[in-house]
Amino acid sequence: MDDPAPRQTIAPGQAASKGGAAAPDAALDSERSLLRFGPMGIGVSFSRPGMFTVTHQNCTEIVATDTRVCGVRRLPQFAFARRGKHAGELVFSVPWREVVEIKRADYLLNAALWIRYRRGDEVKELGLGAGLFWRRSIRVLEEIARRQIGQIADGGS
């Protein structure tokens, strides 16, 4: 399995509140959180979203900041899953300046966002899928991505 982000663990005191006031990684305190949603109902794949794609389901919270989109491992709050050794890890991190292409697809009651980005000399893929409850958040994430990429292209921050 492709591992696009180095493993970083976020201590409980460093994690952002559900309101999204801070970035998920304490090393990047200058980031401003723009959108935060998940983990229940969110699927993450490291390829184009599709029906027969290996997907990490219900375990990643999506956070969009002013410099990147990232996924933080969050386990559902069930009694048997409260203590996971991977909770708080950064699953992926895609800086807006590295994004090559963004496409959104709506199918049935679901929505998906396909992000292609540069990592060195390679072009990698990230698929974010959401069910009915988070469908609007996928649309908002696409709008944020296009706005942030447009600002970078115009020379802004």
Image (cartoon, rainbow, N blue to C red):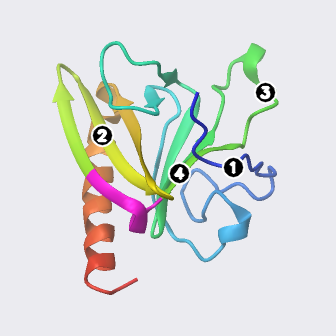
For disc 1, the neighbor class at 10 Å (few under 14, some 14 to 19, many from 20) is few
**What is the spatial separation of the Cα atoms under label 3 and label 1, in whole angstroms?**
18 Å
For disc 3, the neighbor class at 10 Å (few under 14, some 14 to 19, many from 20) is few
Q: Does the segment drawn in magenta span residue 151? A: no
Q: Circle 4 is placed at which residue position?
A: 70
Q: Does the segment drawn in magenta span residue 96? A: yes
Q: On the rendered structure, is 78 left or right of 4?
A: right
Q: Secondary structure at mark 1?
A: loop
Mark 3 vs mark 1: in front: 1
Q: Earlier in the sequence, mark 1 or mark 4?
A: 1
Q: On the rendered structure, is 31 left or right of 42?
A: right
Q: Circle 2 is placed at which residue position?
A: 113
Q: Residue at x 18, y 31 (%)?
A: 106
Position of the C terminus, as image quadrant, is bottom left
Mark 1 vs mark 4: in front: 1
CB under 8 Å between discs 1 and 4: no
Q: Secondary structure at mark 2?
A: strand
